[in-house]
Each structure stands twice: as C-alpha cells, then as structure tokens.
Image: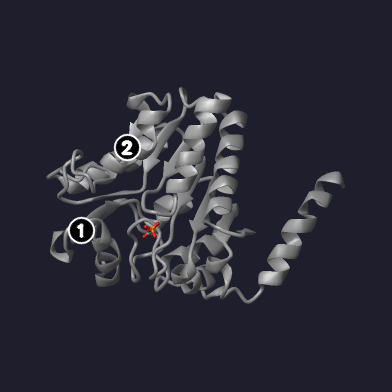
Amino acid sequence: MRIIIEPDYEGMSKKAAQIVAERIRNKPDIVLGLATGSTPLGMYQELVRLHKEEGLDFSKVTTFNLDEYWGLSPSHPQSYHYFMWNNLFSHINIDPDRVYIPSGRVRDIKTYCQWYEDKIKQVGGIDLQILGIGRDGHIGFNEPGSSLGSRTRIKTLAPETVEDNARFFKNKDEVPRYAITMGVGTIMEAKECMLLASGKNKAEAVQKCVEGPVSSECTSSALQLHPKVIIVLDEEASQNLKRKDYYIYAERIASRLEEI
Ligand code: PGA
C-alpha cells in the first residue's frame, strides 16, 4: 500500500486528481471505477479544471460507479446518477454511452447485477477504482459483515450509514434503506485502487483499513490483500495511523528508487 498524507482536504483532492489525470494521459481509453459522497467532490472539481484549462481528454474514458441508492430515480437530487452528472460528467467531454451507474429502479435485481458485472468484464475490467470510506470502514456500500468475496448486489444500509447520509436529505426517514453496490470481490478485481479519506471522523476507519486485521468487520481492510493500492489522506484522517512516520518517510524517499 502506498500511503500519501496531504495537509488538508484541498491537498488530498489535488493529489488524487493528479494521479487520475496521469493514468488517463497514459491510457486514454482507461476504465475508471468512480465513487460518490463528499470526499471525492474536490477531486472531481480539480479534474473538471484540468479538462477545461489543460485539455484533459475524457472522450475515450469508460466509467463504472460503485453504487446507487435503491428506490431513487436518476433525477432525484440525492441519487448518485444526479451527483455524477452534476459534479463531473456534465462538465467534461465524456461519452454518455461509456458511463455506467447502477440503476436504483430495476425490478429484476439479480439479473441486473449480473449484467453490471458482465459489462465490467466485457470492457476488460476496471483499471483504477476510486473509493471513499465510511465511518464503519465500508467501501461502496459493503457494510460490516459483507463477504469479502461479494459481487454486485442489493445491500441493506447500516444504521450508521443511514445516519451519516441523513445530512443530504430533509430528514432521516427519507434516506433509502437499500443500495445496489459493487461487491468487495468486484472492487478487488480492479487493477489498481485509490482510496481517499478526509477528516478526523474517518481516522479510526482508516487505521483499521490500513493496519487492522483483514476482516469483514471493516470491508476496506480487504485492500491489504490487493497488489496495487494508493491511500490518499488529509492530516486529520491519518491521525490514528500507528506507522504514520514510516509512511511519510517512505513517500519522501520513494522518488530515489526511480533513480536506481
Ligand atoms: P463521504 O462517504 O465521502 O460522504 O464521507 C464516504 C462513504 O461512505 O463511502
């Protein structure tokens, strides 16, 4: 795992956007896995800026979103469809035919989830999967107890997640109780993963993800078994890491390895 610690949210967002932009420049037809939530917002803003000011080209990029609330229409302001179009897709030159976001409206969920999995495989798999992390350590909506081999499916949200997401709705009762989400197994098949976290309310989850035991109690800890992971944090989210000094040191001298 490569751990990058930036001073603040802005630094975290810019660093993450830089990494995504570099991957796009190296492979213009890259397949990106995308996340929603407050955490990646700054990264999306920076990607929009890189598109507008530096010509970062998304025309051949394919995207798959991690999850969507079950029961919300794409036009609902809290749906992840709405979030992605509003915060990223409408501002860049992405081909709408290359955008995949799980549907929150399908009735035959099992067939639909299998279709989503097959679609990812058909395009050659996800090259870079962006992830946020929940306070309970979830990635996607893979709440504690989710199988670490799980695939795209419908999942019941944990009370903690409903509470955290209530800030986006008029009241807690409006928060959907279910979501369609890629499974941990789906995420683990991405060729590279990049997890972002900001703020002290994520510090405990980040510590468990990076240094805790690999356990379905904290589904992000499965990333310890992934061969290529970057964790981009701000100072507050990194505050519980036991080996923080080492991560900072390793990152600082990493450039020297390129000279060998
Ligand atoms: P947040 O959500 O970015 O809004 O904190 C992260 C998550 O729950 O995965």
Q: In this view, does 207 lie above or below 40?
A: below
Give x and y (percent) for residue 228.
60, 52
Labels in figure, total: 2
Q: Which amino acid does label 2 sit on?
A: Asn
- Mark 2 or mark 1: which comes first in sequence? 2
How far apart marks 2 and 1 lie (CA) works out to 23 Å
| Residue at disc 2, secondary structure | helix
Give x and y (percent) for residue 147.
36, 65
Give x and y (percent) for residue 170.
17, 58
Residue 54 visible in image: yes
Give x and y (percent) for residue 20.
55, 40
Residue at the image point whose x is 62% and y is 30% from the top? 26
Report which residue position mark 2 lands on. Answer: 86
Between disc 2 and disc 1, the foreground one is 2
Q: Which amino acid does label 1 sit on?
A: Tyr
Q: Quadrant of residue 144?
A: bottom left
Which corner quadrant holds the N terminus?
Answer: bottom right
Q: Which mark is residue 178?
A: 1
In screen coordinates, is 243 left or right of 154? right
In screen coordinates, is 78 left or right of 12? left
Q: Does the residue labelled 2 lie within 8 Å of ligand 1?
A: no
Residue at the image point whose x is 50% and y is 71% from the top? 203
Q: Which mark is residue 17?
A: none
In screen coordinates, is 101 left or right of 130? left
In screen coordinates, is 16 left or right of 109? right
**The image quadrant in which ligand 1 is located:** bottom left
Residue 56 visible in image: no
Question: Which of these two is toward me, 40 or 101?
Answer: 40
Category of crowding for the residue at label 1, using alpha-carbon neighbours closer than 10 angstroms: few (below 14), some (14–19), many (at least 20): some
